[in-house]
C-alpha cells in the first residue's frame, strides 16, 4: 500500500525516482481533470466514472462487483504525449491491470502492465501518445469490483514533447543509418526496458555526497570512490534520458558543478581523474582522456536538450572542454589520443594510446560544435589505426588490445604490461568497450570504415560463441583464444552494438538483448552496469550525436 515505484524489467513504465531520493513530480501538466470519461460499468448511483477525474479524493468510480475485465477511459479531447498516470485506488483495487493509450478509442497500445498490483497509489511514469487513456483491469484483488478515487493523466497536447527538452528519450529524432537492426519488439517495450534499467542504475550509483550541490556517479570497483570515467558516463546517460526522467536536468547540473569544482591540476578546463571518499581530488589531480571525452560529449547533449541559458552555459563549457582535450590529450605528432593531460613529450607513455578511448562519434560531434577541422584529422587517424590493427594483428577476429604502443612509428599491441597488467596487449577490461564505441559510430553515421570494423567483430564473436551469448568469456588474445571464463556485461553487452550493424544478425542481437534483460545490476560494478545501460540506449535507437 501507499506511494511506491513500480519497476518491472518488462513493465512499460518510466519509473519513479530511485529509493533514497526525493519523489519526482512530472514536468508535464495534469490534463485529465474534468474531461469526458466512460467506464465499462458502474456499481451504483454516486459512483459514476466522472467521479474519478473530478479532483476530489472523497468521491470515486466503482465498477460492478465480481466481474473481470472492467475498464475506465478518459478522453483528453486531442492527441497528447502522455508522460505520467497516477492511480489512487480504493479498497477494491486491481491485482492485474494495464494502462493503455489510443488515437481513436478503438485500437489500444499498452504503456504499462502489472500482475502484482497492491493498491494504494500507483504513480507511473510512462511513454505513450493518444487521445484516449484507459485503465483496463483483468484481475480483481478483492471479491468486489474495481474502484478509483482519482485517475490522473499528465502530458502535453498535440503530441509535442515536454517543454524544454529538445530530444526527449524515445523520440528517435536522429535516425540511424539504413539497415541498422534493433532488438525485436515494439519501441515502447524496448524503451521501457531501458528506462527500467536506468532507474536501477541510478539507484545503485548516483549520489549526492559531500554537499556543495554536487551529484556524482560512485565507482565501487575503481581505484577511488569517484573517477572521471564514471562522471562522464553519468553526464552522457542523464542528458540522453531527459524526457524520461523529470529530474534529469537537476542531476546533470550537479554533475556539471562537480566537474567545475574538480579541475585538472594540469589543464583546469579538464576534469581531475580521481577523488577520495571526502570528494577531494587525489593522485596528482590530473585528467584522464576517457572521462574528459564523455564530459564534453555530455555537455553538448545538454545544450541540445535544454539550451545554454540556465545555471550553466553548457555549450561554452563544452567548447572549452573540447579545446582542452585537443590541447592536452591529443598527441600533436600522431593526432592520436594520449592517456591523459599528464602524458608529456619524452616520457614512456607519450606514444601510448588506449583503444577504448577512440570514440569516433564524439570526434564528429566535436567537429560540428567547434568548426575545427582538426577533429576530422583526429577522427581519420583513429579509424585508420583501427583498420591497421585489425588487419595486422587480428585478421580473423577484429579484436583490439587494451593499449597500443609505438604510435609514432609502428603501432602494436604491447607484449606485456605497459600500464595496468600483463594483459595490456590483449582484449581485456579496457578493450571490452571497443565494439560499443566502434558500433556507436557505425549505426549513427553509416561510415564505411566503422561498419567494416564493427562487422568484422560481429562475425567473429557470433561464430566464437556459437550464437549463444552465455559463451562470451571475459578476455581474449587477439587471435580469439579465450583467456578468462565467467561472464560480465562489460564483455557481452558491447557486442550487441556491432550485431546491430549486420542485417543477418537479428536472432543474434535478440539473444544478446535477452541476455542483458536477464542480467541484474551488480551494485559493486558501476563499470559493467554503465556499459550495459549505454549499450541498451544505443541498440534501441536512442543514441544520437549532437
Image (cartoon, rainbow, N blue to C red):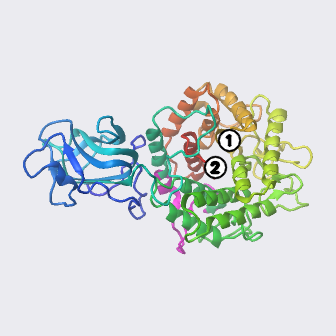
Magenta residue span: 199-225
Left or right of 332 in this view: 362: left
| Residue 220 percent across, percent down from the top left | 58, 57
**Residue matched to label 2:** 545
Q: Please state which of residues 1 and 159 is positioned toward the viewer in this rendering.
A: 159
Q: Residues within 10 Å of mark 1 (few under 14, many from 20)?
A: many
Q: Please state which of residues 364 and 439 is positioned toward the viewer in this rendering.
A: 364
Is residue 358 visible to the viewer in this orientation of the structure?
Answer: yes
Which secondary structure lies at badge 2?
loop
Which secondary structure lies at badge 1?
helix
Location of residue 369 by image quarter: bottom right
Is residue 220 visible to the viewer in this orientation of the structure?
Answer: no
Location of residue 446 by image quarter: top right
Q: Please state which of residues 531 and 164 is positioned toward the viewer in this rendering.
A: 164
**Residue matched to label 1:** 445
| Residue 321 percent across, percent down from the top left | 71, 64
Left or right of 417 in this view: 272: left
Quadrant of the image containing the N terminus? bottom left
Amino acid at each position: 500500500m501507499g506511494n511506491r515505484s513500480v519497476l518491472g524489467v518488462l513493465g512499460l513504465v518510466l519509473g519513479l525516482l530511485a529509493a533514497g531520493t526525493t519523489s519526482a513530480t512530472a514536468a508535464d501538466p495534469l490534463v485529465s481533470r474534468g474531461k469526458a470519461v466512460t467506464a465499462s460499468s458502474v456499481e451504483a448511483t454516486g459512483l459514476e466514472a466522472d467521479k474519478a477525474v473530478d479532483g476530489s479524493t472523497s468521491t470515486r468510480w466503482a465498477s460492478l462487483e465480481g466481474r473481470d475485465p472492467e475498464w475506465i477511459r478518459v478522453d483528453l479531447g486531442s492527441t497528447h504525449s502522455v508522460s505520467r498516470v497516477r492511480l489512487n485506488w480504493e479498497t477494491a483495487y486491481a491485482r492485474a491491470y494495464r494502462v493503455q493509450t489510443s488515437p481513436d478509442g478503438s485500437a489500444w497500445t499498452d504503456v504499462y502492465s502489472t500482475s502484482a498490483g497492491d493498491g494504494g497509489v500507483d504513480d507511473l511514469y510512462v511513454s505513450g501518445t493518444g487521445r484516449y487513456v484507459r485503465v483496463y483491469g483483468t484481475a480483481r484483488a478483492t471479491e468486489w469490483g474495481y474502484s478509483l478515487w482519482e485517475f490522473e493523466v499528465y502530458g502535453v497536447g498535440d503530441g509535442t514533447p515536454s517543454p524544454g527538452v529538445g530530444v526527449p528519450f524515445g523520440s528517435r529524432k536522429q535516425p540511424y543509418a539504413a539497415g541498422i537492426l534493433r532488438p525485436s519488439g515494439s519501441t515502447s517495450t524496448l524503451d521501457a526496458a531501458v528506462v527500467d534499467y536506468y532507474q536501477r542504475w541510478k539507484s545503485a550509483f548516483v549520489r549526492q555526497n559531500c554537499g556543495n550541490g554536487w551529484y556524482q556517479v560512485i565507482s565501487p570497483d575503481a581505484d577511488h570512490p569517484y573517477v572521471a570515467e564514471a562522471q562522464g558516463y553519468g553526464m552522457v546517460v542523464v542528458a540522453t534520458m531527459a524526457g524520461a526522467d523529470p529530474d534529469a536536468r537537476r542531476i546533470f547540473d550537479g554533475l556539471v558543478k562537480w566537474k567545475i569544482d574538480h579541475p585538472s591540476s594540469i589543464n583546469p578546463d579538464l576534469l581531475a581523474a580521481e577523488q577520495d571518499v571526502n570528494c577531494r581530488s587525489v593522485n596528482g589531480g590530473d585528467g584522464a582522456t576517457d572521462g574528459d571525452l564523455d564530459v564534453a560529449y555530455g555537455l553538448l547533449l545538454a545544450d541540445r536538450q535544454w539550451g545554454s541559458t540556465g545555471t550553466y552555459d553548457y555549450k561554452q563549457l563544452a567548447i572549452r572542454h573540447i579545446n582542452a582535450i585537443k590541447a592536452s590529450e591529443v598527441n600533436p605528432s600522431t593526432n592520436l589520443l594520449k592517456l591523459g593531460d599528464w602524458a608529456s613529450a619524452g616520457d614512456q607513455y607519450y606514444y601510448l594510446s588506449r583503444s577504448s578511448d577512440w570514440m569516433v562519434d564524439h570526434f564528429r560531434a566535436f567537429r560540428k560544435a567547434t568548426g575545427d577541422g582538426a577533429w576530422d584529422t583526429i577522427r581519420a587517424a583513429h579509424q585508420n589505426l583501427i583498420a591497421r590493427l585489425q588487419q595486422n594483428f587480428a585478421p580473423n577476429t577484429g579484436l583490439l588490445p587494451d593499449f597500443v604502443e609505438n604510435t609514432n612509428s609502428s603501432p602494436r599491441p604491447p607484449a606485456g604490461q605497459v600500464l595496468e597488467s600483463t594483459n595490456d596487449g590483449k582484449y581485456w577490461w579496457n578493450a571490452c568497450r571497443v565494439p560499443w564505441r566502434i558500433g556507436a559510430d557505425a549505426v549513427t553515421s553509416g561510415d564505411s570504415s566503422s561498419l567494416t570494423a564493427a562487422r568484422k567483430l560481429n562475425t567473429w564473436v557470433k561464430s566464437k560463441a556459437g550464437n549463444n551469448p552465455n559463451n562470451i568469456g571475459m578476455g581474449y588474445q587477439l587471435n580469439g583464444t579465450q583467456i578468462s571464463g565467467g561472464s560480465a556485461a562489460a564483455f557481452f553487452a558491447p557486442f550487441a552494438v556491432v550485431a546491430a550493424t549486420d542485417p543477418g544478425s537479428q536472432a543474434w542481437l535478440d539473444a544478446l538483448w535477452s541476455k542483458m534483460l536477464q542480467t541484474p545490476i551488480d551494485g559493486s560494478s558501476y563499470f559493467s552496469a554503465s556499459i550495459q545501460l549505454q549499450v541498451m540506449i544505443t541498440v534501441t535507437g536512442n543514441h544520437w550525436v549532437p
